[in-house]
């Protein structure tokens, strides 16, 4: 079908839902769909620590709920998270990682999804968050340079798409980071080329991808209501030239995904491809949310008083004090299949303590300085990271962050 999210009964993850409902105010969002992350081989079978159901367990629960839409994240490429440390994966290209990814990760996922018991469930697969964008901007990192070669990100993603594309009830959406990463003209054009090549010509008998997903696990707003025109002149300068936007033409996800979709259709992808936007944490409500455009004639003051994105720097990505955004819904805008919650609220982006304990389930996850509230932003060390303190390893439950997101929800809960 054109849009698997339309007229569907969306699955509720009972594990996340119970945690959310157990937090103050959490019952207001506990009954919405969130993605299930398959972030290691062990997560497929689950639950080695009692914290999860495994892929089959979730699908069985979807059947029991009478749900016919299930969303999960494919996230275990060799050399995963090549430009950061918080979500380093278990597989290495140099240690036969590509073959392991094929045989021990993708193959069992496809086997489970192929079970006739699940044939009436529309399965939305979010494909490898942040991977291909790293090949556009971070090839100076040795792990990313290696991931740009044989058995790396392109080979891995093409294999996943080819295998999942043989199942008619699976709809694959490939991750394209967000406007604050790929929005600059050079990044955008390079990304269209690289990602467009990676997802095209997958072979006979393989369904094309359903579309792309932006803002996965990030905080960029869907729209900046008081900054609609990047070329607006303030104090004799374009708004896009401000310190916060650094000449990026895209301030928000909606214009970014609209132009991305058009670029991909122009490249020859099907005209019915759709976009997803992760709105789990990009609401930016609360008492500091602007209510109108600034009246200042100073450019940076104008931008800082007008923008709803309250980060000190747009590159801050770890455990930010955002807010629950738009609730999951189908067809919010033309060409946008759905607002979705890819990153479940309350799950950490990465551990804050530089002297961190090892995660017993995922010992490759490390501390990234962008998750340290006492560190400076690696992209511009004149800004703090803005990360919340007391954060556990990526994916672990972080109640303090959950509380901030609920309190800063917009639209209000």
Image (cartoon, helix red, strand yellow):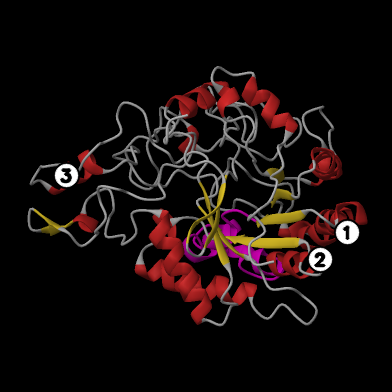
Point 84% across, 32% down: residue: 48
Q: Residues within 10 Å of mark 3 (few under 14, many from 20)?
A: some
Between tags 3 and 2, which lies in front?
2
Determine the CA span between mark 3 and mark 2: 50 Å
Note whether residue 97 is visible.
yes
- In the displayed structure, 86 sits above or below 252; it is above
Q: Are marks 2 and 1 in contact (CB under 8 Å)?
A: yes
Between tags 3 and 1, which lies in front?
1
Q: Are marks 3 and 1 in contact (CB under 8 Å)?
A: no
- In the displayed structure, 317 sits above or below 147; it is above
Q: Secondary structure at mark 3?
A: helix
Mark 3 or mark 1: which comes first in sequence?
1
Horizontal side of residue 181 vs 171, given as left or right? left
Magenta segment: 128-155
User: If the image is split into quadrants, where does the N terminus sit?
Assistant: bottom right
Determine the CA span between mark 3 and mark 1: 54 Å
Does residue 145 belong to the magenta stretch? yes
Mark 3 or mark 2: which comes first in sequence?
2
Point 69% across, 45% down: residue: 10
Q: Which residue is mark 1?
A: 114
The x, y position of residue 372, in whole percent, is 47, 31
Horizontal side of residue 254 vs 131, given as left or right? left
Q: Secondary structure at mark 2?
A: loop
Q: Secondary structure at mark 1?
A: loop
Residue in front for this viewpoint, 244 or 84: 244
Does residue 96 belong to the magenta stretch? no
- In the displayed structure, 196 sits above or below 297; it is below
The x, y position of residue 313, in whole percent, is 34, 43
Q: Residues within 10 Å of mark 1 (few under 14, many from 20)?
A: some
């Amino acid at each position: 079908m054109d849009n698997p999210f339309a007229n569907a009964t969306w699955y509720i993850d009972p594990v996340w839902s119970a945690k959310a409902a157990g937090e103050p105010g959490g019952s207001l969002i506990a009954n919405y769909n969130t993605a299930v992350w398959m972030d290691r081989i062990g997560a497929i079978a689950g639950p080695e620590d009692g914290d999860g159901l495994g892929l089959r367990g979730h699908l069985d629960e979807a059947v029991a709920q009478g749900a016919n839409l299930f969303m999960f994240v494919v996230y275990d490429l060799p050399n995963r998270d090549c430009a950061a440390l918080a979500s380093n994966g278990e597989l290495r290209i140099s240690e036969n990682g590509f073959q392991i990814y094929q045989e021990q990760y993708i193959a069992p996922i496809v086997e489970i999804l192929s079970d006739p018991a699940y044939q009436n469930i529309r399965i939305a697969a979010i494909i490898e968050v942040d991977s291909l964008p790293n090949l556009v901007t971070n090839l100076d990192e040795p792990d990313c340079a290696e991931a740009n070669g044989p058995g790396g990100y392109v080979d891995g993603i093409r294999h996943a798409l080819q295998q999942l594309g043989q199942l008619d009830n699976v709809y694959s959406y490939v991750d394209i980071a967000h406007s604050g990463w790929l929005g600059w003209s050079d990044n955008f054009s390079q990304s269209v080329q690289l990602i467009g090549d990676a997802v095209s010509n997958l072979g006979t008998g393989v369904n094309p991808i359903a579309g792309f997903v932006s803002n996965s696990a990030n905080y960029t707003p869907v729209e900046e209501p008081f900054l609609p025109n990047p070329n607006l002149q303030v104090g004799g300068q374009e708004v896009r030239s401000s310190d916060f936007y650094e000449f990026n033409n895209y301030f928000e996800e909606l214009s970014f995904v609209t132009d991305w979709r058009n670029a991909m259709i122009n490249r020859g992808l099907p005209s019915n491809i759709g976009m997803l936007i992760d709105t789990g944490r990009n609401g930016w409500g609360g008492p500091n949310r602007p209510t109108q455009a600034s009246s200042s004639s100073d450019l940076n003051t104008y931008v800082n008083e007008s923008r709803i994105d309250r980060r000190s720097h747009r590159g801050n990505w770890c455990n930010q004090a955002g807010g629950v955004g738009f609730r999951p819904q189908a067809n919010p805008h033309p060409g946008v299949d759905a607002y979705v919650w890819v990153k479940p609220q309350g799950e950490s982006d990465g551990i804050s303590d530089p002297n961190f304990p090892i995660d017993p389930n995922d010992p490759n996850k490390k501390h990234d300085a962008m998750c340290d509230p006492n560190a400076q932003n690696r992209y511009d060390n004149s800004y703090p990271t803005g990360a919340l303190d007391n954060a556990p390893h990526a994916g672990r439950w972080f109640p303090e962050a959950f509380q901030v997101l609920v309190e800063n929800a917009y639209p209000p809960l």
